[in-house]
């Protein structure tokens, strides 16, 4: 297999047989994977927070309804 460096992108090479771009820079690959995992975790955190807020809203509505019901019985 022959590799040709990709101009302007250190660590990237084009495989002349398959025409694929290959990343030979393991540190850059590891950093990219870490950044992807971090972004994925942040998305999950936001989704968890949305769920928590929805649950809190439901609880507040229940408390308000319970208070209204109790006031009506007094």
Image (cartoon, rainbow, N blue to C red):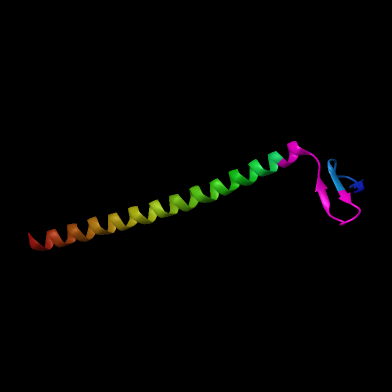
Left or right of 4 in this view: 69: left
Residue at (31, 58) in percent of width and height: 58
Query: Which residue range is magenta in the image?
Result: 14-29
How many numbered callouts?
0
**Residue 61 pos. (x, y %):** 28, 59
Residue lying furthest left in this view? 74
**Residue 69 pos. (x, y %):** 15, 62
Q: Is residue 11 magenta?
A: no
Residue lying furthest top in this view? 27
Q: Quadrant of the C terminus?
A: bottom left
**Is 46 situated above or below 34?**
below
Camera-nearest residue between 67 and 6: 6
Left or right of 38 in this view: 67: left
**Residue 35 pos. (x, y %):** 64, 43
Q: Is residue 22 magenta?
A: yes
Residue at (73, 42) in percent of width and height: 29
Left or right of 9 in this view: 45: left
Residue at (57, 49) in percent of width and height: 40
Q: Quadrant of residue 50?
A: bottom left
Residue at (69, 43) in percent of width and height: 32
Camera-nearest residue between 51 and 20: 20
Q: Quadrant of residue 30?
A: top right
Residue lying furthest front in this view? 1
**Residue 22 pos. (x, y %):** 82, 48
């Amino acid at each position: 297999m022959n590799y040709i460096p990709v101009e302007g992108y250190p660590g990237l090479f084009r495989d002349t047989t398959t025409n694929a771009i290959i990343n030979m820079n393991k540190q850059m690959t590891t950093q990219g994977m870490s950044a992807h995992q971090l972004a994925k975790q942040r998305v999950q955190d936001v989704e968890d927070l949305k769920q928590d807020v929805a649950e809190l809203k439901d609880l507040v509505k229940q408390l308000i309804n319970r208070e209204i019901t109790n006031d009506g019985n007094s």
